[in-house]
Image: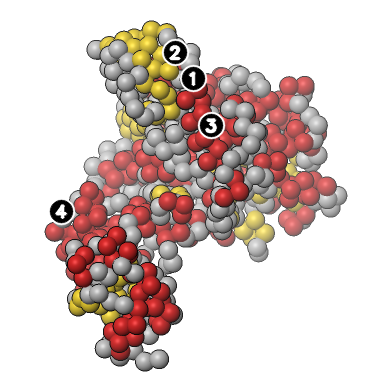
């Protein structure tokens, strides 16, 4: 995973420290702490991991090990409009792969990437529990059901996508 | 203690509850092959992630095969270690491990000492199925001043991670990623040089394959030896003489001092000197500093106690990175390697009329951190290092063999003068507790003005990770702490940080056992008996020396008279002392 370096604001560091305190600075709660941290920052840049390591008193290499082990965690900033495609069994058999290909083609992005302007990021997830709507696409909090490849452009246009 | 009975390969055996199948089999003389497993018995640390699956065995009534390194025995268990099913599974596992492993064994630095290679030989692998569909990994190699990481050869045994985290508590290496991408790396996959690595080399010492190896300086050394314009001076660390013989088939604990000197001379070194000389010099500087701080303490003047030894470069890296708030506590004395270099390229170079740039100083060290230490900027004059390069005990063994020599056939020869003269105090630097014992021998006599009746301080010896002892300086009880292994050192340092430490002086060595267990020594596979034998060899050499106290070394006395003045003089400070840097990782914060 690529190294992403940012400088955190003092207030952000304090916010992170508060999250760690919430879990009693317990090294056993590393995953929960990271989960919450990613909720705040949208991703886990190196500095966030360093603060967490320092607060939980564990090596930063261990934190990085956990971040890179679980596919949920990411070190790449999420786009303004994060696009998530369900590639669970039901969505997959109903053509999620073709929908995904269309997103990739139009956005010129691979799964896990964020567009250069920071607007869109593309990710896959497994089953959102709406198999009746398969294939399912999420953009931010909004859900789109029974999506076909030819609808992809329309969806993107809602978020200011221009060819 | 409760016992359980079981049979392994039809042989009955009784072992305590909680014993693994692997250990029970060992008791019967059955050697189940292992790869990821590592047992550091004397430290109470076992690496058994059960990740490699080489050690699988068949257990009656159990569906799948059991990893014997991490499966405990049960009453009445029936185990078979060599059935067709086991042998097939073991071979398949090994073939998978080999399928994406580079096949450059012939030119691999670990060739001949590689445990993966040994397994391939043991299991008689002649073809690797699935090789054509295996994708080779292409990690970039990481070249640090001491250690090379070549992760294409990593088998994910995670022994290095155990050494780095559990034993040394350095925390540089961790398993990262998953599946085919998994590897052991520093945080954010940064290079070692940017990480908190101390270069202690304990990861290299336990790596079963060529994934972690030392930087090899022998080609440069051979070039220097062949250059008629260069005067090549060598110094040998105390621990080397107690282990080098092992590489030539001698039993652990064989002293090869004289043979080593003979071999070095035949390799073409112009002067064969001893780091022990510089160890004696270290004692005069460090011992004087200790007495200076103790006297101030007793007079109620402001000073810093405890004083910490500073001869171990892995340890120096550790406190610079992890305890930057305590930089004023360690002695400012340079390590013997660096003191030697500084004296060789000034005093000795002048004496023989050789220009600094025409002299090459080489050190033979049991250590990988020494390779980094001699490259530090503070040990250079106009870009020219005091010690040009450092080679490990293992590299020296290679070099001797390459030059068609067998250490077994060497005569015993003596070191050259003047920098080859040393005392028994200098030689015990190589064992944990040795530096502080050597310091006590001198400090006692200087402080009390009396002769020591007995120079052996047995209370300071041993292999216990943390030791405490009192030495009576004429009624004043000097409290001494000793730690070896950085994990143990951390405990003593945290006490100091909390103001809880009662010690006046602490000796710290980064490697378990001290330098005898250094990262550059012949591989000891965590066997503490080997370490104890090497240490005993050093104490034997000490006991047989005519002079056993550093301040009585005639060449040291002459050096002070003719060149340095007295310990801690201006000149001594310039050449023999150093300063430390805060190298702790900093988190970037925007205001």
- Label 2 SS: loop
Report the quarter where the N terminus of chain A lies.
bottom left
Left/right placement of residue B400 relative to residue B303 reads right
Res. B588 image quadrant:
bottom left
Q: Position of residue B66 (x, y in %)?
A: 38, 28
Report the quarter where the C terminus of chain A lies.
bottom left
User: What's the CA distance linking mark 1 and mark 4?
Assistant: 50 Å
Count every numbered label the image shows and give the total: 4
Looking at this view, name the residue that lies furthest to the top.
B12
Q: Position of residue A119 (x, y in %)?
A: 33, 83
Query: What residue is shown with label 1?
Result: B82
Q: Position of residue B274 (x, y in %)?
A: 65, 36
The numbered mark at residue B9 is: 2
The numbered mark at residue A156 is: none
Query: Which class describes the residues within 10 Å of circle 1: few (<14), some (14-19), or many (20+)?
Result: some
User: What's the CA distance linking mark 2 and mark 3?
Assistant: 19 Å
Query: What residue is shown with label 3?
Result: B91
Q: Are marks 2 and 3 on the same chain?
A: yes
Chain letter behind tag 4: A
Foreground residue among B354 and A154 = A154
Query: Which class describes the residues within 10 Å of circle 4: few (<14), some (14-19), or many (20+)?
Result: few
Closer mark to the observer between disc 2 and disc 4: 2
- Label 4 SS: loop
Query: What residue is shown with label 4?
Result: A24
Query: Which class describes the residues within 10 Å of circle 3: few (<14), some (14-19), or many (20+)?
Result: some
- Label 1 SS: loop
Q: Is residue B245 above or below residue A70?
A: above
| Mark positioned earlier in the residue sequence (2 or 3) | 2
**Cβ atoms under marks 1 and 2 closer than 8 Å:** yes
Q: Is residue B233 above or below residue B415?
A: below
């Amino acid at each position: 995973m690529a190294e992403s370096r940012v400088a955190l604001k003092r207030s952000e560091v304090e916010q992170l420290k508060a999250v760690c305190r919430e879990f009693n600075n317990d090294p056993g709660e590393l995953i929960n702490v990271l989960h919450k941290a990613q909720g705040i920052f949208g991703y886990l840049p190196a500095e966030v991991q360093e603060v967490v390591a320092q607060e939980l008193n564990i090596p930063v290499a261990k934190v990085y090990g956990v971040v890179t082990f679980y596919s949920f965690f990411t070190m790449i900033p999420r786009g303004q409009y994060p696009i998530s495609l369900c590639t669970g069994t039901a969505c997959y058999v109903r053509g999620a792969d073709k929908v995904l290909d269309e997103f990739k083609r139009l956005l010129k992005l691979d799964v896990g990437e964020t567009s250069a302007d920071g607007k869109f990021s593309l990710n896959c997830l497994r089953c959102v529990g709406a198999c009746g709507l398969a294939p399912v696409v999420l953009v931010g909090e909004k859900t789109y059901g029974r999506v076909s490849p030819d609808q992809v452009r329309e969806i993107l246009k809602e978020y200011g996508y221009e060819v | 203690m409760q016992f359980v009975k079981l049979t392994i390969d039809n042989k009955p055996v009784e072992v305590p509850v909680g014993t693994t199948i692997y250990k029970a089999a060992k008791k019967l003389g059955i050697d189940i092959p292992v790869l990821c497993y590592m047992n550091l018995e004397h430290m109470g640390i076992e690496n058994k992630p059960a990740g490699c699956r080489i050690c699988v065995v068949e257990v009656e009534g159990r569906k799948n095969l059991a990893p014997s390194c991490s499966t405990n025995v049960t009453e009445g268990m029936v185990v078979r270690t060599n059935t067709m099913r086991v042998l097939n599974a073991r071979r398949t596992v090994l073939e998978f491990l080999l399928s994406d492993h580079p096949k450059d064994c012939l030119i691999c630095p670990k060739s001949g000492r590689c445990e993966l290679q040994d397994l391939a030989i043991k299991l008689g692998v002649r073809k690797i199925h699935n090789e054509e569909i295996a994708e080779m990994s292409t990690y970039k190699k990481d070249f640090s001043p001491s250690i090379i990481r070549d992760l294409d050869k990593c088998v994910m045994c995670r022994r290095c991670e155990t050494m780095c985290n559990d034993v040394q508590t350095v925390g540089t290496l961790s398993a990262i990623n998953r599946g085919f991408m998994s590897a052991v790396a520093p945080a954010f996959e940064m290079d070692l040089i940017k990480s908190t690595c101390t270069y202690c080399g304990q990861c290299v010492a336990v790596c079963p394959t060529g994934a972690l190896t030392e930087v090899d300086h022998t080609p440069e050394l051979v070039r220097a030896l062949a250059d008629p314009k260069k005067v090549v001076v060598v110094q040998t660390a105390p621990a080397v003489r107690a282990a080098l013989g092992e590489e030539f088939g001698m039993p652990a604990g064989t002293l090869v001092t004289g043979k080593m000197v003979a071999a070095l001379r035949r390799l073409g070194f112009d002067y064969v000197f001893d780091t022990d000389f510089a160890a004696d010099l270290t004692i005069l500087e460090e011992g004087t500093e200790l007495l200076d701080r103790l006297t101030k303490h007793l007079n109620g003047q402001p000073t810093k106690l405890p004083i910490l030894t500073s001869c171990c470069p892995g340890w120096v890296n550790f406190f610079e990175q992890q305890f930057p708030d305590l930089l004023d506590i360690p002695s400012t004395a340079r390590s013997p390697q660096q003191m030697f270099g500084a004296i060789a390229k000034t005093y000795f170079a002048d004496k023989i009329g050789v220009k600094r740039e025409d002299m090459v100083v080489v050190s033979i060290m049991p250590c990988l951190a020494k390779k980094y230490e001699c490259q530090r900027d503070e040990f250079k004059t106009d870009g020219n290092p005091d010690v040009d390069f450092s080679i490990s005990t293992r590299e020296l063994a290679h070099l001797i063999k390459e030059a068609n020599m067998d250490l077994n056939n060497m005569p015993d020869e003596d070191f050259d003068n003047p920098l080859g003269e040393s005392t028994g105090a200098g030689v015990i630097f190589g064992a944990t507790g040795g530096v502080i014992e050597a310091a006590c021998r001198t400090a006692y006599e200087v402080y009390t003005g009396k002769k020591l009746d007995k120079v052996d301080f047995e209370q300071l010896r041993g292999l216990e990770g943390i030791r405490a002892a009192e030495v009576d300086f004429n009624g004043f009880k000097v409290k001494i702490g000793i730690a070896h292994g950085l994990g143990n050192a951390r405990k003593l340092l945290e006490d100091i940080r909390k103001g809880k430490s009662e010690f006046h002086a602490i000796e710290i060595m980064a490697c378990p056992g001290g330098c005898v267990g250094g990262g550059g020594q012949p591989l000891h596979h965590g066997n503490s008996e080997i370490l104890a034998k090497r240490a005993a060899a050093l104490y034997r050499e000490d006991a047989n020396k005519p002079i056993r106290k550093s301040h009585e070394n005639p060449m040291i006395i002459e050096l002070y008279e003719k060149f340095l003045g007295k310990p801690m003089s201006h000149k001594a400070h310039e050449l023999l002392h150093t300063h430390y840097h805060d190298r702790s990782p900093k988190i970037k914060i925007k205001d």
